[in-house]
Image (cartoon, rainbow, N blue to C red):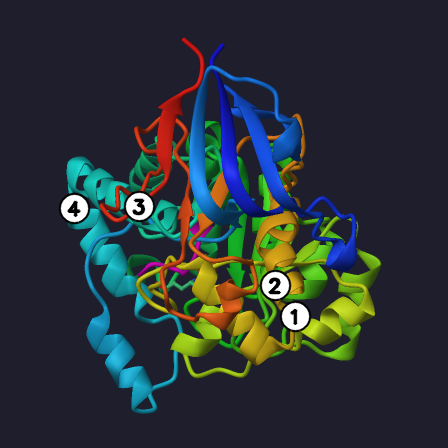
Amino acid sequence: MTSTLITGIAELVTCDGTGPDLLGIQPNAAVVVEDEGIVWIGAATRAPAADTAIDVGGRSIIPGFVDSHSHLVFAGDRGPEFAARMTGQPYDGGGIGVTVAATRAASDDELTRLLAARIAELRGLGTTTIEIKSGYGLTVADEVRALQIAGQFTTETTLLGAHVVPTEYAAKRAAYVDLVTGPMLSAAAPYARWIDVFCEPHSQHAFDADEARTVLAAGAAAGLGLRVHGNQLGRGPGVQLAVEFDAASVDHCTYLDDADVDALAAAADTTVATLLPGVEFCTRSPYPDAAGLLAAGVSIGLATDCNPGTCYSSSMPWVISLAVREMGLSPAQALLAATVGSAKSLRRTDIGRLVPGNRADLTVLDAPSYLHLAYRPGVPIARSLDLTASGGTSAGRSADPSRRTTARG
Ligand code: NIG
Ligand code: FE
């Protein structure tokens, strides 16, 4: 086992639930990592010896971001759809078919190469855990393929065969639900941890409450964890359904009524409301009141939803700045939501907090304080720390002054 001592940390934000704003901040701290786990955290002056050392040069360290909602296995481009939306065209999910056609036509190698580039991009922005959905194949073989490719990069894989009804099934929706809940689920289950459904009566392409219920029941029976795309385009049944099924997460929550908020608050131990403010930004939609949700007792998470339609951004720092500017969260609340909150939505306690025993998923900020995540919107101050790479950074930035030295032997 190789141990590494990380020093030069002006501000260590552990997000461990202690101290002001629950951030567990330790100034002038050090961390010792063994293999992939944290074994010691404390004052730099009391740090034990280790095999190697990394000096981050007076920067901040926070838990790596947990991006608990993405659709990263895809080919093709929908820039023109975005441009049309900016001139008033509403989003209705119809563009998903464009990505389905391009993704089906792409080779395994092409999809893997595209995904690898997106993973490198998000790691370079400070994300260390990524959930990846299928949903641009919509045949048994294409959904399984997407999950197998995603599984090369993450354990948090989600079957989203119920993304939209593909055009070849437009006149036989029930047959498509049968396909998803039968042969597709059987073939995909070995490669998926989760199942998700786009429950949205406001889109003719997505699934209504009864269809979504069928998908969630089948997924649960197959042993998968449950997630729901709900209440994105208007008020609807998604949130209530997610709570009824003890889903780990209901995502978007753009349009909520009081009963939805009450249901989410009552289910705060099990179901996280995962907010995706990049989607509201990129679709010119109203932002949900995240501060109000917290005040009501709802568990919230933050994620990018990175996808070619509603939000083609992999930047969690940008999501945090939107959550602060547009959804009423304090910078501390937004950081907690993007780490601990999103980890909870994946039912994980080994990530999101920097405490001994947890994974050593560390993100370095080229800033004196975590406040700069929201204070410096659009500036690439965050990067995940790659403990295996020379220089300690996965982003490979030439200007990175983090230094790896051999402290022992
Ligand atoms: O989370 N709403 C459904 N799915 C994605 C968008 C997918 C797309 O437009 O390609 C979302 O917003
Ligand atoms: Fe999504």
Residue 5 at what x, y percent from top left? 51, 26
In the rendered structure, are the residues bearing label 1 and label 2 in contact, judged by CB atoms less than 8 Å apart?
yes
Residue 221 appears in view = yes
**Tag shown at residue 330:** 1
21 w.r.t. 121: above or below: below
In the rendered structure, are the residues bearing label 4 and label 1 in contact, judged by CB atoms less than 8 Å apart?
no
Q: Which residue is mark 3?
A: 400
In the rendered structure, are the residues bearing label 4 and label 3 in contact, judged by CB atoms less than 8 Å apart?
no
Quarter of the rendering occupied by the C terminus: top left
- Point 53% across, 43% down: residue: 9
- Whichever of labels 2 and 3 marks the residue nearer the N terminus, that label is 2
Residue at disc 2, secondary structure: helix
Does residue 19 appear left or right of residue 355 in this picture?
right
State the separation of the CA atoms marked 2 and 4: 37 Å
In the rendered structure, are the residues bearing label 2 and label 3 in contact, judged by CB atoms less than 8 Å apart?
no
Q: Amino acid at mark 1?
A: Ser
Q: Which residue is mark 2?
A: 334
Q: Amino acid at mark 2?
A: Ala
Farthest residue, direction front: 45
194 w.r.t. 97: above or below: above
326 w.r.t. 151: above or below: below
- Whichever of labels 2 and 4 marks the residue nearer the N terminus, that label is 4
Q: What's drawn in magenta, residue-wise?
A: 160-166
State the separation of the CA atoms marked 3 and 1: 29 Å
Residue 362 at what x, y percent from top left? 50, 39
Query: Can you tell which of label 3 and label 1 is closer to the viewer?
Result: 3
- Whichever of labels 4 and 3 marks the residue nearer the N terminus, that label is 4
Residue 275 at what x, y percent from top left? 58, 65
Q: Quadrant of residue 82?
A: bottom left
State the separation of the CA atoms marked 4 and 1: 42 Å
Query: Can you tell which of label 2 and label 3 is closer to the viewer?
Result: 3
Circle 1 Cα neighbour tier, 10 Å, few/some/many (<14 / 14–19 / ≥20): some
